Image (cartoon, rainbow, N blue to C red):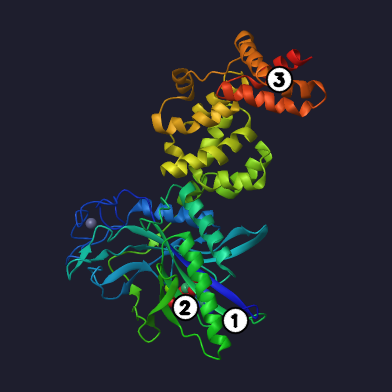
Amino acid sequence: MSAYEAVIGLEVHAQLRTRTKIFCSCSTQFGREPNSNVCPVCTGMPGVLPVLNRTAVEYAAKMGMAVECAVNPRSVFARKNYFYPDLPKAYQISQYELPLAEHGRLRITVNGTEKTIGITRIHMEEDAGKSIHSSTENKSFVDLNRTGVPLIEIVSEPDLRSADEAVAYLKALRSILVYLEICDGNMEEGSFRCDANVSIRPKGATELGTRAELKNLNSFRHVHKAIEYEISRQAALLEDGERVVQETRLYDVDKGVTVSMRGKEEAHDYRYFPDPDLVPLLITAELLADLKRSIPELPQAREARFITEYGLPEAAAQTLTAEKDLADYFEAAARLYPEPQRISNWILSDLLRELNQAKTAAADSPLTPAHLAELLGMIDSGQISTRIAKQIFPDVFTTRESPREIVERKGLAQISDTGALEAVVDSILSSNPKEVEAFKNGKTKLMGFFVGQVMRQTKGQANPDLVNKLILEKLQ
Ligand code: ADP
Ligand code: MG
Ligand code: ZN
């Protein structure tokens, strides 16, 4: 493989989070009864006319600006003609020669190395419906709820050189879309999906090799595996003196391989032409300026700010800012309790673990930023030990009580009462005379043993500083 270099270009489809479809007023809500979000327009009845959704245009233009594209003041919708049961009009309205936005770029970092990936174009289009093939009956069904849902397609230059770079690029794109609140980024539901074009060429060559287009990549893991598999498949062909053929290949999730779906000969001729039902889309400089002002701080800028403003290590800043709601969570907690590094540690270890387990987003976390601040406050005022704090953290997720309520209900408050602790210390010392003797003869390492025994007996609730002080006093 080392004799070859991989070349990858990605076509990403992102579903825009509008309330209604791109050319009609049907709802875009996911998961409804099949064929309930439909009307004569999106089912392609004769005589109807599409009306462009203004919000979809605004969202698409925002994404264009966020990745430094030039947004064209005039773009044109075109018909992409093909026949398929999930496409009732037998054409998809898309953009072809004059897309909404072009010539953008996106910076990615892989293994500490920065790289800029060119974005060829971003165009708007409508989604198709969904074919459902029954496994029990010998039948197929069509659900047109998704027909006409607004999409943007983001096409990259063939600038990516590895599966790692491809995944880093996809994650960066997805993160921006979610920050802009124009796409929910849900890969499982298909709101963010991609096709990967993969070719290889001898290292140092400038011409592109013949590519395969990989489909059915619905998670970052699948994208990574499919690209790696495809690179080695193509390399093996070339090593054997064979040629790569241009074709569309499907990723088989179970087998971890790509399989041929259709070759170049079977490729569609889409007979694109401008849609006569839609006038050219004109975007004024004024609207663009308004939209630009509404773009929030984006993930890469936020990451840089987290490093300078809160003094966080780069890795922490990157994880915290990758998802907007997690970054918001962090900043809310840091405002309530200005100890950013500790807050970051608690989020990255305990919060993320619990959110993953509960399959919950940071925005819906039962343990709120206020709870985290409360927890740190209780530790710092000596009401509970760090150990107890770690212990009750998951309880907030199951019982939905505040940390303080749990501490009170379970009687977990730290024992800082000298009298109560003295009794425990006395009993530990008197039941371990040999250790006491050894300590007095200079084996001071045994301090840890005594403290440990006291903590055990008090179920971790003893104030460790006080325990240390009491033991030392007794052993003087
Ligand atoms: P199509 O519309 O037929 O899919 P395009 O020429 O628009 O083809 O390219 C689609 C994607 O394929 C782009 O992301 C582009 O960067 C990528 N691409 C084109 N040629 C190659 C190649 N030889 N190897 C890898 N990627 C490629
Ligand atoms: Mg393509
Ligand atoms: Zn409709």
Relative placement, left or right, of 107 versus 35 is: right
| 357, 111: nearer the viewer | 357
Residue 166 drawn at (x, y percent): 54, 64
Alpha carbon of mark 3 to alpha carbon of mark 1: how far? Answer: 76 Å
Q: Residue lying furthest bottom in this view?
A: 241
Question: Which residue is identified by label 3?
Answer: 433
Alpha carbon of mark 1 to alpha carbon of mark 2: how far? Answer: 13 Å
Q: Amino acid at mark 2?
A: Ala
The C terminus appears in which quarter of the rendering? top right
Q: Amino acid at mark 1?
A: Arg
Relative placement, left or right, of 119 versus 452 is: left
Residue 59 drawn at (x, y percent): 42, 52
Binning the other alpha carbons within 10 Å of mark 3 as few (below 14), some (14 to 19) or many (20 upward) gives few
Going from the N terminus, do you reach mark 2 or mark 3 first? 2
Relative placement, left or right, of 161 versus 395 is: right
Q: On the image, which quarter does residue 359 sit in?
A: top left
Nearer to us of marks 3 and 1 is 3
Going from the N terminus, do you reach mark 3 or mark 1 first? 1
Q: Amino acid at mark 3?
A: Pro
Residue shown at 72% from the left, 16% from the top: 469
| 416, 306: nearer the viewer | 416
Label 3 sits on a secondary structure element that is helix
Question: Which residue is identified by label 2?
Answer: 212
The N terminus appears in which quarter of the rendering? bottom right
Q: Residue lying furthest top in this view?
A: 419
Task: Name the mark on residue 201.
Answer: 1
The answer to whether residue 288 is seen in the rendering is yes
Residue shown at 28% from the left, 71% from the top: 91
